[in-house]
Image (cartoon, grey):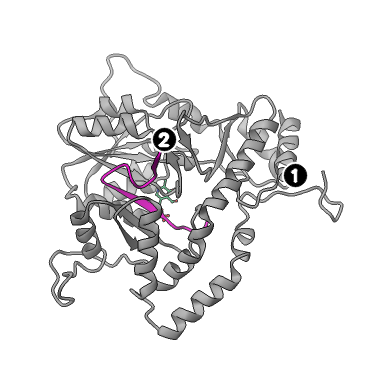
Amino acid sequence: MTAASGAPLSVPFLDLGGVNNGLREEFDLAWKTVLDHGHFVGGPEVERFEGEFAASCEAKACIGVANGTDALELILAGLGIGRGDEVIVPTNTFIATAEAVCATGARPRFVDVCPDTLLIDPAAAQAAINSSTAAIIAVHLYGQMVDPEPISAIAAAHGLALIEDAAQAHGARHRGTSAGSVGIAAGFSFYPGKNLGALGDGGAVVTSDLGLANRIRSMANHGRSVTDRYLHDVAGRNSRLDTLQAALLSAKLPRLDAGNARRAAAMAAYREMLPQGCTPVSVQPGAAPVYHLAVIQVDDRSEVGTTLTAAGIGWGVHYPIPCHQQPALAGLHEPVAHEFPVAHEFPVAERAAGRILSLPMSPTLTVEQVARVCDVLGGAL
Ligand SMILES: Cc1ncc(COP(=O)(O)O)c(C=O)c1O
């Protein structure tokens, strides 16, 4: 399969240019409007985007913040979680989920994931609960929501806060619920490569608990009182979504669903054309993922990766080192006491970490490009 030039078709891992180029006119207008009014922080575009994004998540409130890690940390802090508390976190996630817990002074309690979806295993979460547990973070990884029912039931039965890490799941749904509407609050990232990405860093907290929303809004803005800007009720910080990013995100939000549908179509094409030996992550009954990533499992990742790179095909690994094995988090994770020595504490995540590979995925990915990737994979296996 060749490009128009006759050279073999190369396929980028993520086509950010393709995603953003179609919006140049809207971006130019957004930039001009913000430059004209000059409210670069806290301008009217922030409130507008917050309203639009909350509605799209079926939540009552949204607070724009500086990034997705801050969103999670502010949710935890807003709930009063900190030193002495434990927060249950799946070990297969981006390190930011655990970093947010550590930043509050609380301790991440890692748990294993389900072998088919690689999402948090509700039974493992249940087994990890102890008297210090304050919350569970359900990470909607790769664009697929954690099944809300079992995890909500466990959290409710033990009086724990359920927090969603929806950084990879803008627009994802599960049996009529949308990412951001399941837990007490959800953290989103607008890092440029996300399904809804800014042209820089950005993030949001989404919640229907208006008291929590007010606390987080204040904490993210130097702990300012809502009624008096010179009164600081709590020791807060600066974590705000800037006006320009909010304006750009408002321009992109109306295209989110269409982009997600194109990702789903590309994933369907992968499922049809993937050669034997490439097993995509499963979709649970009732789930409507948004395919932030197209993750497969293979036996010999290093061989497959070398072949893809040689053919000009972008790929990645999300994530090759589970959180409990990251040096930065060493010492935070207390091994569970076992009667006999066991080689693997989180066998599912540890096995998957050596086998997962993320294939090219973008809303602009064509069937021809998917076919090229699958051809090359067929040659590698
Ligand atoms: C699962 C997950 N959680 C949290 C984050 C943190 O978001 P940010 O990079 O905006 O801080 C990311 C972003 O990469 C993520 O993928």
Cβ of mark 1 under 8 Å from ligand 1: the answer is: no
Residue that badge 1 annotates: 368
- The reply to whether residue 66 is in sight is no
Q: Nearer the viewer, mark 1 or mark 2?
A: 2
Picture quarter containing residue 203?
bottom left
Along the line of sight, which residue is nearer the eye, 272 or 128?
Answer: 272
Q: Residue at x 70, y 28 (%)?
A: 275
Q: Which of the numbered marks, if any, corresponds to residue 337?
A: none
Position in image of residue 230 (x %, y %): 15, 77
User: Residue flagged by tag 1: what amino acid is it?
Assistant: Glu
Q: Residue at x 59, y 73 (%)?
A: 25
Q: Is residue 176 magenta?
A: yes
Q: Residue at x 71, y 36 (%)?
A: 374
Q: Secondary structure at mark 1?
A: helix
User: Residue flagged by tag 2: what amino acid is it?
Assistant: Arg
Position in image of residue 7 (x %, y %): 83, 51
Image height of 285 relative to 193, above or below: above
Find the magenta span and give its range.
175-193
Q: Is residue 188 magenta?
A: yes
Position in image of residue 322 (x %, y %): 42, 36
Quadrant where the N terminus is found in the figure? top right
Q: Secondary structure at mark 2?
A: loop
Position in image of residue 328 (x %, y %): 36, 45
Residue that badge 2 annotates: 175
Looking at the magenta stretch, what is its main secondary structure? loop
